[in-house]
Amino acid sequence: MTIPTTIRFVTLLICCTLQTGCDDGRGERMAALNRLVGQPEQTLLLTMGVPTRSYDSGGVKYLAYDEQLIDIIPGTPGVGPWNLGAVPPQPIERSCETTFQVAQGIVRSFILRGNACD
């Protein structure tokens, strides 16, 4: 049995759209963060604000910025007067830590950690 060309095209289009949609957020974040590499530390502070925490080691600074998000997965109503089978809404905690490495007053690199970095 062969799949009609139209169905294959629509399936491919949907898959490509979903893939692009997933990449957009991370791509934009990465582009914005990449623009800070090579910039003075002052530009980083003006752009990102005061870091959540910092650490100095051998003349190299590490500036960390934490982002916390809570997504809510909607619940489902139950059946009947006793709400049988009801599922309450569920909070999902997500976080992203962006740590910049600054040496000689210049942003050298960054790293992302967490499940909300997209």
Image (cartoon, rainbow, N blue to C red):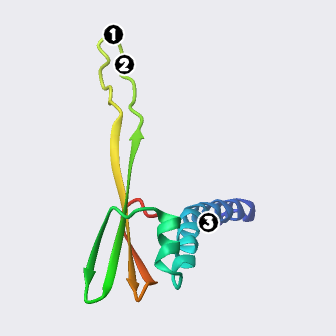
Counting residues from the start of the chain, the first of labels 2 and 3 encountered is 3
Mark 2–mark 1 distance (CA, rounded to whole Å): 7 Å
Left or right of 82? Residue 38 is right
| Outermost right residue | 6
Question: Label 3's element?
Answer: helix
Question: Label 2's element?
Answer: loop
Q: Quadrant of the N terminus?
A: bottom right
Mark 2–mark 3 distance (CA, rounded to whole Å): 38 Å
x then y, percent, for residue 97: 36, 65
Counting residues from the start of the chain, the first of labels 1 and 3 encountered is 3
Left or right of 88? Residue 116 is right
Corner quadrant of residue 87: top left
Please state which of the two labelled residues, at mark 2 or mark 3, is closer to the viewer: 3
Q: State the residue position of label 2.
A: 79
Residue at screen point 58% across, 65% down: 19
Q: State the residue position of label 3.
A: 20
The amino acid beneath tag 3 is: Thr
Q: State the residue position of label 1.
A: 81
Residue at screen point 39% across, 29% down: 76
x then y, percent, for residue 91: 34, 41
